[in-house]
Image (tube, rainbow, N blue to C red):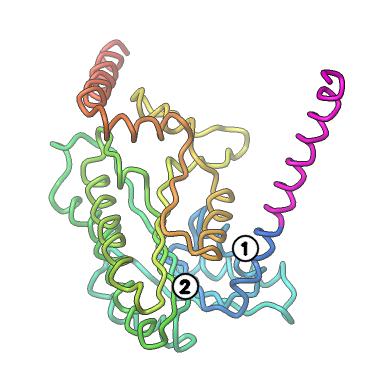
């Protein structure tokens, strides 16, 4: 009996692993086919995550509308995508200049986006402005710029394409948000506030538009782990809590794959966090006093370390 169990257990493990692998491959292939001929808008296509998304969706046959602040970078990305693909099965991306910090330009941007193909099937809001500084050093103008880029800009564009989605009774709005939309850490006052605001907007929007067949998804991730260039790793944060988070970040390609999967499976909410950031979320919810004490101690440790340097 014992000998038979020893023989059967490894075979069972291999079988389960094989089924899981096949399942993931099927889901991955289905995710690619789901975006074929769909009009997909990426609000910051020239960022690391945006570029990876553009590659995935372009290969999947999506009709891309690539947005960004730099026309030269958008053209370079479009050229790279076109040169690396079969023109018989892909579409040449449309390019739109977009700067969320310039709110006055948003009506023209909405018009231009809708004129590209006459509609939008998927809107991926992945633009973000980050800043780290003590609250007393941040000007009100900087606070407004962060709110425009991270909150007012994305919701203005979402509202702009929403009526078209409602009339067609189909569409998908996806927010790529930071975990700081759920968990605030020191020296990110304006950034965390903007992320909390946009998270709440999309959560409310989800319930409002479900009856029209429109999907709303949010992906809250930890720090984006930059791919080292020339063998030089990114500098580590001095704050202990931020250092833990950064060591457990996500890579742009990994996040792009999750965005594609979220769209195909119409997931409502995704948390991309490793155990430590996830534990911090639960501690903040159930043991707030402990969380505040740990965060405060981390700030004090950082201040002492700076004094000793």
Sequence-wise, the earlier of marks 2 and 1 is 1
Q: Which mark is residue 17?
A: none
Which residue is rendered at x = 59% and y = 75% of the image?
62
Position of residue 306 measured from the top left corner of the image (x, y, whole percent): 29, 17
Question: Residue beneath label 2, please?
Answer: 122
Mark 2 or 1: the one toward you: 2
Which residue is rendered at x = 42% and y = 59% of the image?
268
Foreground of the two, 109 or 90:
90
Report the label total: 2
Can residue 209 be seen from the camera position used here?
yes
The quadrant the C terminus occupies is top left
Foreground of the two, 275 or 212:
212
**Dot 2 lies on which element?**
strand
**Dot 1 lies on which element?**
helix
User: In the image as oriented, which residue stretches furthest toward the front?
Assistant: 1
Part of the protein shown in magenta: 1-25
Judged left or right of residue 219, residue 160 is left
Which residue is rendered at x = 58% and y = 65% of the image?
77
Q: Is residue 192 magenta?
A: no
Position of residue 201 measured from the top left corner of the image (x, y, whole percent): 26, 61
Q: Indicate whether 286 appears above or below 171.
A: above
Which residue is rendered at x = 77% and y = 44% of the image?
18
Question: Residue beneath label 1, please?
Answer: 56
Position of residue 153 measured from the top left corner of the image (x, y, whole percent): 28, 66
User: How many residues crowd around disc 2 within 10 Å: few (fewer than 14), some, or many (20 or more)?
Assistant: many
Judged left or right of residue 213, residue 163 is left
Can residue 109 be seen from the camera position used here?
no
Foreground of the two, 10 or 256:
10
Toward which corner of the image does residue 281 lie, by quadrant?
A: top left
């Amino acid at each position: 009996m014992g000998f038979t169990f020893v023989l059967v257990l490894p075979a069972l493990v291999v079988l389960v692993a094989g089924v899981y692998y096949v399942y993931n491959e099927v889901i991955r292939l289905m995710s690619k086919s789901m975006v074929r001929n769909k009009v997909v808008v990426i609000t910051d296509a020239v960022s690391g995550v945006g570029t990876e998304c553009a590659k995935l969706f372009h290969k999947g046959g999506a009709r891309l509308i690539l947005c960004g602040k730099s026309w030269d970078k958008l053209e370079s990305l479009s050229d790279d995508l076109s040169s690396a693909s079969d023109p018989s099965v892909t579409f040449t991306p449309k390019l739109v200049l977009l700067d969320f910090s310039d709110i006055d330009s948003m009506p023209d941007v909405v018009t231009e986006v809708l004129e590209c193909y006459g509609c939008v099937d998927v809107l991926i809001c992945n633009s973000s402005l980050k800043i780290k500084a003590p609250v007393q050093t941040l000007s009100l103008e900087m606070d407004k710029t962060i709110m425009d880029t991270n909150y007012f800009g994305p919701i203005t564009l979402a509202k702009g394409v929403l009526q078209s989605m409602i009339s067609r009774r189909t569409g998908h709005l996806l927010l790529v948000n930071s975990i700081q939309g759920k968990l605030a850490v020191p020296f990110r006052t304006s950034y965390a506030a903007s992320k909390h605001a946009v998270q709440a907007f999309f959560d409310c929007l989800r319930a409002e538009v479900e009856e029209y067949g429109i999907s709303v998804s949010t992906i809250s991730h930890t720090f984006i782990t930059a791919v080292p260039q020339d063998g030089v790793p990114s500098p580590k944060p001095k704050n202990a809590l931020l250092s833990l988070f950064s060591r457990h970040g996500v890579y742009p390609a990994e996040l792009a794959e999750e965005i594609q999967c979220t769209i195909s499976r119409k997931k409502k909410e995704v948390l991309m966090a490793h155990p430590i950031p996830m534990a911090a979320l639960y501690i903040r919810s159930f043991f707030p006093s402990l969380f505040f004490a740990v965060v405060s101690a981390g700030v004090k440790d950082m201040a002492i370390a700076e004094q000793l340097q």
